[in-house]
């Protein structure tokens, strides 16, 4: 194998810094993952979403239910963040790709 195979061609695009829209798209992806995680927890450990019931695990469930990490295990805020960022990022992409009508 020759070295020329591994050299980038002059026509190949150079790696650039991420754009703000790209970074927001990444945050949108993290919010989507948080929603999926929330649904999995809802399926297997519903006390996290609805508060603890009566029983042996009530202390642990109450501690988790009142923790400051509600964004991770309760999906409401993550869903709102996902839709808010989706509207912004997708609108921004449409604006940038729209043909210019200026003469």
Image (cartoon, rainbow, N blue to C red):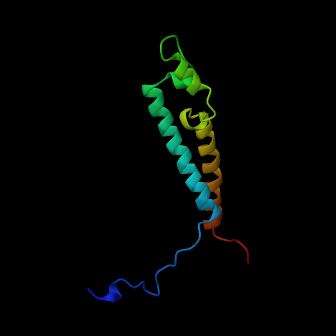
> Picture coordinates of residue 1 (x, y %)?
26, 85
Q: Quadrant of the C terminus?
A: bottom right
Q: Residue at x 56, y 45 (%)?
A: 31
Whether residue 17 is situated above or below residue 30 in the rendered picture:
below
Task: Work out whether residue 52 or residue 50 is closer to the camera in this orientation and state it.
Answer: 52
Whether residue 102 is situated above or below residue 46 in the rendered picture:
below
Tell me: 6 left or right of 16.
Answer: left
Whether residue 66 is situated above or below residue 81 in the rendered picture:
above
Q: Residue furthest top?
A: 54
> Picture coordinates of residue 48 (x, y %)?
53, 25
Task: Work out whether residue 8 or residue 53 is closer to the camera in this orientation and state it.
Answer: 53
Q: Residue at x 56, y 38 (%)?
A: 72
Say which quarter of the image contains residue 93: bottom right
Q: Residue furthest right?
A: 103
> Picture coordinates of residue 83 (x, y %)?
61, 44
Q: Residue at x 68, y 71 (%)?
A: 100
Task: Work out whether residue 89 or residue 57 is closer to the camera in this orientation and state it.
Answer: 57
> Picture coordinates of residue 22 (x, y %)?
58, 61
Task: State how many labels appear.
Answer: 0
Q: Residue at x 56, y 27 (%)?
A: 64
Whether residue 15 is situated above or below residue 59 in the rendered picture:
below
Task: Work out whether residue 100 or residue 15 is closer to the camera in this orientation and state it.
Answer: 15
């Amino acid at each position: 194998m020759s070295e020329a195979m591994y050299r980038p061609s002059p026509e190949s695009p150079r790696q650039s810094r991420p754009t703000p829209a790209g970074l927001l798209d990444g945050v949108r992806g993290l919010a989507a993952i948080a929603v999926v995680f929330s649904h999995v927890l809802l399926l297997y450990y519903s006390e996290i979403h609805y508060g603890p019931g009566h029983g042996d695990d009530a202390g642990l469930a109450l501690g988790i239910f009142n923790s400051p990490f509600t964004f991770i295990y309760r999906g409401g805020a993550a869903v709102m963040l996902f839709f808010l960022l989706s509207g912004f990022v997708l609108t921004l992409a449409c604006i940038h790709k729209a043909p210019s009508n200026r003469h």
